[in-house]
Every structure is written in structure tokens, then in C-alpha cells.
Amino acid sequence: MSSIRARPDTGLLFFDFRLKGKRCREQTMLPDTKQNRKRLEKILDQIDAEITLGDFEYRKYFPNSGRAAQFDSKEEPTDVAPVHVSPSFKDFADTWWNENEIRWRRNTISGNRAVLNRHLLPVFGDRTISEITKADVLAFRAEVALCAGRSGNKTLSPKTINNLMGILNMIMTEAADRFEFQNPVRNIKRLRLQRKDIQPFSLGEVRLILDTVRSDYKQYYILRFFTGMRTGELHGLKWSRVDWDARQILVRETVDKGVVDYTKTDGSQREIAMSSVVHDALRAQREVTGDGEYVFVTRDGTPLDTTNVTQRIWYPLLRYLELTPRRPYHCRHTAATLWLAAGENPEWIARQMGHANTEMLFRVYSRYVPNLTRKDGSAFDRFVTNAINGGMEEEVQS
């Protein structure tokens, strides 16, 4: 009797039927689920009907089977959808890559390729993609969590692991849709990320840095502290993007490792208002670089190199001043907290930073505002005190 069965070793479904007195078993790459069984049973009913009528064509259903030649007929096969066999993870990953690479930025391409080559292909590359189970994915995540991270970290961070799993999920989602199996990554929750404390510089520390830094980098750090520009945005700033009349800096591109690229996001394309100190710094820098293309350049006239500036200028300066070591990105944090401390409109600040809305502004920076402005609830305290003492009507009218 014909049936759909599952292999005990793999759990994958296969057809079991008889044709011309011979028992035939044909393997599929579909896991044993109710939905897959229902689908295969419909196909098996059609096979049984055609066998009964004497017009069953083996190769129509199982074109890659080694037994197909035994039952070939001289008649031309009709259009019957064969049972799909899914490819290896590596083969499908190559397909997925070729289809998606065109929409990625350069940094995304290099990052995704590194994830594939270092982590995903060594583990899953030779596996049939539909055979990968949730248990396999969880074991992979547990193993990769023990890998050494960058910058001397003993293990990969939860953020990095979530990124690896995100890329795996994109590949498996597309494969599951095409080959009709359940995505094993679908219901796996992301690792919880610990909130990182940022350490913006105080205004006094900013003044100390600007008073001490090498004179040829003073204008550079004025812009870092008072514009909120990212490193690549500042290194990629061209004089053609400085609008003197409107007193604006037009952020349009970035430079990373000598390569000009689009900004981090569409929202990063923005106009930054020049404060007086930024305007004066740019005027002074213009005297230095003259008619060059970029605002901040090396002696050869090329954009600054991030690693060189960080290792030769930034960290030695912090050590000399005995300030807590912080990544240059904290200059951007400093700009945000100083704007908030000055009482600027949060929506305006978000636009200056290149944020889509004020959510990140309040989530990341707002807790620093009381320490910088001393607006720590004292206004509310005065209002309530006056109200309790009988001055509510007068307070409200004022």
C-alpha cells in the first residue's frame, strides 16, 4: 500500500509505493510536519491514480532519481511539477548573495561576506539547507558565543551574535519560502543587549582638550565636539559642502579607508547649522588647506585616516591629560548633550544628529541633561510648594 513515511534517522519524508511489482522509495528533503505530509499525500494520490490508469511517468515526478531510467517510456512527459530537492546551504547562500549584493553598501557587503566565510559556511556549508534544524541553529549560536571577539574581547558580543543570526535568518527565510520547509531560525529570540553607558565630555574637558591638542588638529576637534558629525562624515567633508551664506555644513558622503561612500543612512543626509565657533574654525581651516578638495587632509592632500588619527593623536592626548580613555565617537555624544544642556529644541537636535526622530535622543542622552543644566525637577518642586502654600491660582495665572 502506498504511503508517506519518515526516515527515523533524519526525520525527512519519503514516498513509498509499488510500480510494476517493484517497491519504490523516493526521498524528499521535507521534514516530517503535518503540512508537508498533507502536501505529499496529495501528490501520492495523483501517482496512485496514474499508476491505476497505466499512464504514470516516473521521471515526471522524480527527474533526478536513479530508478527513473527503469520505468522510462517513449511518450513525451507532460507538465507535472516534480518534488523539489533543496540545495546545499553553500549553493543557496551563493544564490542569495548574487541576488542581494546589488542593494548593499560597501561596508554591508564586506561585513556580510565576513560572516559567511568565518562562521556560517564552515558550519552549514555542506548541509542540505532544508535539513538544518532549530537544534542545529541553537548549537551553532552556543558555539559561536565562545569565539574570541575583537579588540581583545574574550568572546563575541551579543550584538555581534545577533547580527550573525540575522544574516542566517535572512538566508533561511528565503530558502524556506522557495523550497517549502519551516525556517528553523524563525522563532529563536535575539540575545538581550546590555545597555552601554556613554561618557560624553564635560565642557571643561572639551576646553582642556582644545587648549592642549596639536594646533593643526584644533579646528578638527572643534568640529568633532560641536557638530555631532561621525568620523567618516567629517573626514569626507568637502569645501563644496560648506555653505558659507546659509552657515550650514551639508553632510552628503563619508570616507572610510580612503573610499568615498554614501552616508550611513538616508537620514544621515542632512544640513548642520554652524555655530559661531564652528564657523570661525572652518574659516581658520580654509587658510590652511587653501583650494584643496577636502576640509581636513593629510600632508599629501588626501582625506584623514581614521586609525592614524585615533592612535597617534586622540588616545595619546587623553593619556597626557589623564582623562578616561574614550572612543572618538564620544565627541558626537558630547555634542548631543551640550545641545540639550543649552536648551535647544530636541527635534532640531535630532535633525543635526541625523536621527529620524527624537526617540534615540531621549533614550540615550536625556539622563545627562540634569547633571549639565541643573534642571533636575526643581521647577516642579517650586510649583508644587507654591500650590500647597496657597499660591496655586497665582502660579497658574503667571
Image (tube, helix red, strand yellow):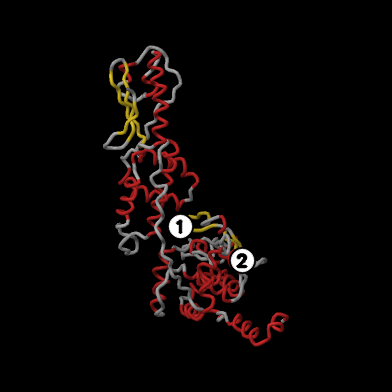
Percent x, y of residue 333: 50, 70
- Residue at image mark 1: 258
* Mark 1 Cα-neighbour bin, 10 Å: few <14, some 14–19, many ≥20: some
User: Residue extending furthest bottom?
Assistant: 389
304 is higher (above) or lower (below) than 284: above
Asked if residue 134 lies left or right of residue 345, the reply is left
Q: Residue at x 56, y 62 (%)?
A: 355
User: Label 1 sits on what residue type?
Assistant: Gly
Percent x, y of residue 57: 38, 17
User: Label 2 sits on what residue type?
Assistant: Glu
User: Residue extending furthest top?
Assistant: 74
User: Residue extending furthest right?
Assistant: 397
Percent x, y of residue 270: 59, 60
Q: How many marks?
A: 2
Q: Which numbered tag is attached to residue 347?
A: 2
Q: 301 or 49: nearer the eye?
A: 49
Q: Residue at x 50, y 81 (%)?
A: 204
Under circle 1, the secondary element is loop
Task: Tell me the CA gap for discs 2 and 1.
Answer: 33 Å
Viewer-nearest of labels 2 and 1?
2
Earlier residue among tags 2 and 1: 1
* Image quadrant occupied by the N terminus: top left
Asked if residue 271 lies left or right of residue 97, the reply is right
Under circle 2, the secondary element is helix
